[in-house]
Image: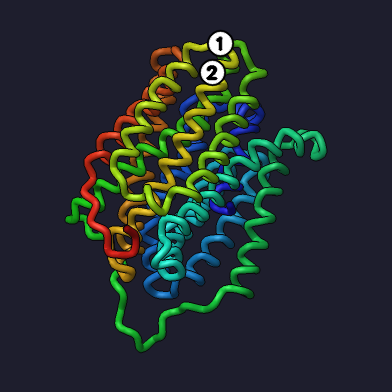
Amino acid sequence: MDLRFTLLAVPPVLPQIHRDLALDEKSVGALTAIPVLLLSIAAIGGSVLIARLGARRATIAGLLVVAIAGAVRGFGPSVAMLFGMTFLMGAGVAICQPAAPTLVGQWFPQRIGLATAVYVNGILAGEAIPADLVPVILPHIGNSWEWNLALWSIPVLLTAVVFWLAVSDDSVAPSAPRTAWWPDWHKLLTWRLGMLQAGISVLYFGLNAYIPDYFHALGRPWLAPIAIGALNSAQVPGSLATLFFAQKLAGKPRYFFAILLVALPAIAMLVAGSDWVAVAGVSLLGLCSAVGLTMILALPAMLTHQGDVHRLSAGMFTIAYLGSFLLTLLGGVLWDTTHVPATAFIPVAIGVLLVAFVGGTLPMKHRGAVT
């Protein structure tokens, strides 16, 4: 949950930030996309820390960076502080990202699908909870978006303390052979997994970036919080369902095509439907995001040996989040250029196509942990 709390505390207050700091649509897109870019740039740093310190200490370091940077984003407030600390916060999340599949492989080598589903349920709960609670919390903190951003760092800090006190140390002994950490960029699997996750990431981050301003631009501002809440809340039943079938379905290419068949009509419902049809379309997109993310994040631990999971994960995240950043930013550029709000969702449709055609043609050769 902590990998998403501070990220997803932003979309519900984007209109206030937009107004107070006089941001244009490209800047709004960048604010949401900067952490995604850092998930790309700093993922290799996470791989280094795992190889040198172990997954536990790497996770603690990443959580502390997330908590501190996330809390001070609203200081000023100023554009420089907001964007600078968002940049640093994204780096902290990125350090934690490769650690999670590594821990899944270490702790549950025979139940990778199920363990990944539990982990993804945490991520999706961390996305849904701020979307639902921020509108409730804001009146009690003077409708301050600055204090809202700071509050969501508290559980992250507490988790770092719990990890330090309660999780067994897995640090690497000084005399142990050096573990490789640099991703294998020559391996086609690294690039295919990266493209696959880029598609599912832009489906989620691209919608979160532009849905609030989209409905404001259409003169239907009351739908913005409802749609954001629906997008994030719909992921919860999708992710809970994966607890029952992820172990059997993880790694099956045909399920990526199913995402295409649901998501493309849902995008059409969002941009062309009436109020409640649009909300229904957003809900379907949230469901697709949850199921797709679970299926994808299980793949590194399934497709390589345990000692290489952090490298494959880091390479996958680097490619995935760079692609997602560029596609999300493209949505803002298209909107600013055409002055047509719906064009912001064209990259989302591109992401859905990537998921279907890359995931649907991915050769699955399991390392033996999952059948």
Check contact, mark 2 vs mark 1: CB within 8 A.
yes
Q: Can residue 6 be seen?
A: no
User: Residue 222, which numbered label?
Assistant: none
Q: In this view, does 107 lie to the left or right of 223?
A: left
Coloring applied to the structure: rainbow
The one nearer the camera, 166 or 321, is 166
- 187 vs 244, left or right, is left
Judging depth in this view, the residue of 215 and 332 nearest the camera is 215
Q: What residue type is labelled 1?
A: Ser
Q: Position of residue 322 (x, y in %)?
A: 35, 43
88, above or below 201, in the image: below
Observer able to see residue 317: yes
Alpha-carbon distance for marks 2 and 1? 6 Å
Residue drawn at point x = 63 percent, y = 57 percent: 156
- Give the image location of residue 132, x and y in percent: 67, 36
Residue to which mark 1 is pinned: 274
Seen at 59% across and 47% down, the residue is 126
> Residue 131, position in %: x, y?
64, 36
Identity of the residue drawn at 50% across and 24% down: 25
Q: Left or right: where does residue 205 sit relative to residue 85?
A: left
Res 198 → quadrant: top left
Label disc, if present, on residue 278 of the rendered structure:
2
- In which quarter of the view is residue 279 placed? top right
Seen from the viewer's position, the closer of residues 230 and 364 is 364
Residue drawn 36% across the image and 63% down it: 310
Quadrant of the snapshot with the C terminus? bottom left
Secondary structure at numbered mark 2? helix
Residue 277, image x and y in percent?
54, 16
Secondary element type, mark 1: loop
Residue kind at label 2, given as amino acid type = Ala
